Image (cartoon, rainbow, N blue to C red):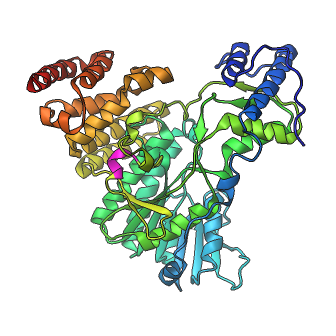
Amino acid sequence: MKTKIERSPFNNTSKAEIVKAIQDLVPPGSPEPQCPTVLADLQVLTADLIQAYIATGKLTEDPFGDVLTRSIHLYQAEVSSLVYDKVILVTGGEGCVGSQLVAKLATLGVKRIVSVDKQRGTDGSAIKLTTDKQVPAVMYAADVRDYNALKSIFELEKPSIVFHLAAQRLPWLAEIKIHETVSTSIFGIQNIIRLCESYGVQQCVFSSTGKASRYFTSEVYAASKKVAEWQFLQAALQGDTTYSMVRFTHMLDNSSVCQQIEDKIEQGKIVNLHAPERYIVGQNGREAVHLLLNALVLSQPGKLKFLTVRNLGWPTETLEIALYKILQSGQSIPIYFQGLIPGYEELFFLGQFDWYKPTEIHLLVNALEEKFTTVDPSGDILVTEIAPFNLELLNRHLLIFQELLNNSNLADIEIKHYLAIVVKDIVRSSFAWSSTYQLLNTLRWGVDKKRLQAEGTPIIAHKDVVQLLVQELYGRINCEDLTQSKITPQRFDSIIEMLVDLPSLEQQVTYLKAISKKFKNSLL
């Protein structure tokens, strides 16, 4: 059933006008509206917005329809040969992806499946799997941060292959449960790596997030995942176990966004969205399981290969998702924009991608990682590596972090603050490894004046990553670098003009102005 579109008393015709009217009625940051008159006006404006979307050909089908049915190749014969008659351990085995992975493993000839999950598992209880062949499986209730509990499981079960999926999955909740999120990404992963090495595990596959592709982030969810990736790269370089990982994006089988919208509609309540022009990229559980299993085949000893779905499709606007679900419900449900909340506040940095190759841009792979990227033989998967960094620096930070996390008197905000320091230092070491050409292009795309002005984004919104880039470029640039990067004197001056708005870069700006003068003289 579709919502009946009433004639609107408002004189708004375009999407932008209607969105502005909604925001004027309930400014972002306001509490959820309760006034009956305001709610009635929001109902009409929401109906107007639905009509505006329909006029552009949208809302005729599920925005995620293609994603929900999409699939990628599975190297089934190769995977089966690797897991045949082996004990497979899955942390987070009762979660959305973990449970689907367990079910798939049961069809591949494994000897036994061991699920470790802190939430719902019952220690030692057997689970029955619906498969053609009964596969012994056991569930344990254990937190991956508890080394002794994990050690007992490894000692008893002796797994040959480990899939590490246990983690915080909600960015907003990570900002509330900071200690738990960060300690899981440090102690939990240290425990998994240590036990994999101690018990001769052949392969370990880790599930990460596309948010970890950001050069710098202070958000707890993404930053803790970056630290996790760095720990696994270190283990891959120094350990005997073969490590690999996958990067997931928004999992539609367990979508917090879709669930929240559907719950509000079912309850007949107003739907709250963070903001207009907010997009998510979706994938389904089947793709996730295939990525995890294919990582066993595409991994390489001594390296940390990570896999992503090659074709994720176009990003989908959360506003479109909400309007489609309201339309299909047949109810007159209003929406409003509550404003961005912690965990979702960071704006997209344009320097994330190589804009010289726009058709090859992938939302889960940054420009520094792109140079390591290959396409698997099936054509469905990108196989990549994360950028090198200073391993000794990571070790020093991890030792300090252990002391901090063991301090019960330390406030969560201090943990978040130090997490940002760690990410900044490690990223700085990655930038030091990168070529001047790469850094120049990352900077030019990231501070593009026209694009930032079109977005209404001040450069201060990206100050942390811009400072890291400019500080690393200090003393490294010559005229040949600018020529190779296809940066004209006018474009270089435009970059410098943008950087003037960051007082912390005064010394670097003076240096860049001197380079600009030298560059212009070289062209005379």
Residue 64 seen in this snapshot: yes
Q: Is residue 319 on the magenta stretch?
A: no
Quadrant placement of the N terminus: top right
Q: Is residue 358 left or right of residue 292?
A: left
In this rendering, the answer to whether 95 lies above or below 56 is: below
Q: Is residue 4 left or right of residue 390?
A: right
Please name the residue shown 55% across and 69% down the image: 73
Please name the residue shown 55% across and 72% down the image: 74
| Residue at the extreme front | 524
Main structural element of the magenta stretch: helix, strand or loop?
A: helix
Corner quadrant of residue 458: top left
On the image, the x and y values in percent for residue 454 come to 48, 22
Corner quadrant of residue 446: top left
In-front residue for pair 73/235: 73
In this rendering, the answer to whether 390 lies above or below 413 is: below
Which contiguous range is marked in magenta?
Answer: 366-370
Quadrant placement of the C terminus: top left
Residue 253 seen in this snapshot: no
In-front residue for pair 13/342: 13
